[in-house]
Image (tube, rainbow, N blue to C red):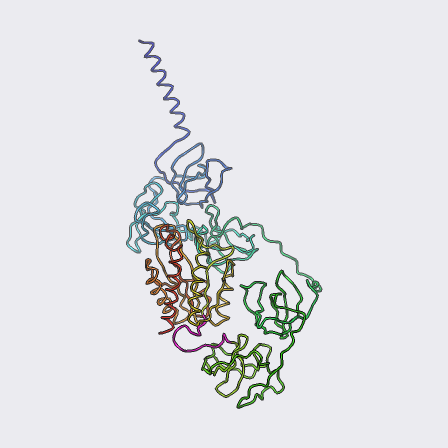
Amino acid sequence: MKSRIGILIASMMLFLSVFSVTNSTNQAFAAVQFKVNASALNVRENPNTTAKIIGTFAKGQSISGLQDLGGWTKVNVGSKTGWVMSKYLSKPSAGTAVKIGYVNTSQLNLRQSYSTSSKSLALLTKDTQVTIQSQKGSWLKVYLSSKKLTGWVLNSYISDKKTAAATSSAKTAVTGSKYYVTGNELNIRTQPNTSGKVTTSVKKGTALTLYEKKGDWGRVKTAEGKTGWASLKFLTTKAPAVASAPTVKPAPAPAVKTVKNFITASKLNIRSKPSTSAGIVTILKKGDSVTLYQKDGSWGKVTTSTGKSGWASLSYLSSQQPVAAPVPAPPKTDEPVTENPGNNTPEDTELTPAPSETVYLRDDSNIRTGPGTSYNVITLEKKGSAVTKIGEKDGWVQVVTASGKTGWVAAWLTGTKEKGLKGKVIVVDAGHGGKDPGTSGINNTEKALNLKVALELQALLKSKGATVIMTRSNDTYPTLTERVNVSNQYKADAFISIHFNANGDKSVSGIDTFYYASNTNEKQLAQCIQEEVIKQAKLLNRGVKQGNFQVIRENKQAAILIELGFLSNPNEEKIVETSEYQKRAALGIFNGLEKFFSL
């Protein structure tokens, strides 16, 4: 019996000793608050220096330690946990517990309870002061005195000092590191993921200031002062090589022999780049001559007879001059043209007589002797002038001015003042495209849905006699600047940018329309479209709001951007992916435009 008792006691002592050793090397404890005492402290996936870095803490930042393991401390970083080296942490002395905290990120949700799925009570900006009341795990219960709200925030985004206060009067504080873009074009987004909206894009070699890292993303600031998140995969600290001042050398030999060519199409766009999505420099008519001096695939770089340079489709160029058709006698007018005797009066072989009607000029316009920019200018008529339309040819209209002068003006520069959509110029912009998919849901990309709705809208607008300009008709990516340029170039009566939305909270749903108050009637346009789309789509009405999106901010025409639902909401994605919904959404936008132009 004594032998058995001895064996039992020995076993218990062995167990306790093993437990004691294990507990000393892997100590779990209630969350303890620490301060970072290193200038920058990496947070890693696992407790070793070869593990992936998933975040960085700044010096003086308050963090909660969750567990110790062999010289490492487990901490919260955002919604994840990671490991930092314990030697770079220090505990605040007794009696100095942080009672006042400051937001250390650009935006932080104050939530109703300690969960990322909980309702957001307010959005706190950087350096907002809060009073810390208690802590639960990685969450802090705080009081926001400015709005008299109590809620919960993630502990990792609260510091005991303002970020600005961390700098000394000698300006020796860290102000960010300079990085350079390595990709051809890099999107800057509102969030550290591809679901974040693109606020701007920067070219290869552009210098950015990096302030914060979050996984594979970095919070950056451009030279223009715009801030957002960029993928770290396309950033480097190595500055691009700066070429020494080049010596003047003879121009390189042209890609092709300089050859005179002629336009074979009734009219041909000359574009700024070898792409159908590029801006139009000028429009030439059949038989016009150009000098071809470079080829790029199916495109040729040309110079017009007026000295303008651009790109034309090689399919509509020929080295053979078209045979001119017999020239019938020109139509008689009550007052012959006398400003330019002997000028290049056009052939009338393709003139389509038009019933006499009054049209109005959308902008200051040259009235020319023929249907093309190569013809002489008779007179300059001011924006809003009434002229009488008497004929049409190759995208130009023949008009008689108020003073009785007969000439030609580009059709897109004319319009009617009648109510409704007839004669209106509408630019339809399918957001994103090509290399930029936009946001995405479980089964759909935003760029694909945007285009489907845009094409439905195009058909509806054309049926009512509107002139529709598409920024893209397939899976291409016109830049934001190019989209705006199209609208400004065609003097659009309205610019409609079509998008779908996303949110980290999958329950968020509905439709909203944005405007930038540069034109007095843009809010009214947004309201008309929002009201009619809600009637058709029957989703939650999130209202009309001012937005700072480039395609509406830089637009000189009446412009709106509409978000037609949330792909991040699985239930809403099932609705918006149907062709029935896309047709209803397009009809709502169409009805809104018709309503606006009938006011």
Is 286 in front, or is 229? Answer: 286
| The N terminus, quarter of image | top left
Q: What stretch is highlighted in magenta?
A: 411-425
Q: Where is residue 20 in the image (x, y as percent from the top left)?
A: 38, 25
Is 69 in front, or is 400? Answer: 400
Reply above or below: 190 against 48. Answer: below
Q: Which residue is drawn at 37% across and 21% down?
A: 15
SS majority, magenta? loop
Q: Where is residue 202 in the image (x, y as percent from the top left)?
A: 52, 57
Left or right: 47 as drawn, with respect to 350: left
| The C terminus, quarter of image | bottom left
Left or right: 231 as drawn, with respect to 543: right
Query: Does the stretch in magenta take in 420?
Result: yes
Is 73 in front, or is 437? Answer: 437
Q: Residue at x 57, y 63 (%)?
A: 275
Going by the picture, which residue comes out furthest to the bottom? Answer: 334
Reply above or below: 440 against 270. Answer: above
Is 168 in front, or is 331? Answer: 331
Q: Where is residue 380 in the image (x, y as percent from the top left)?
A: 53, 82
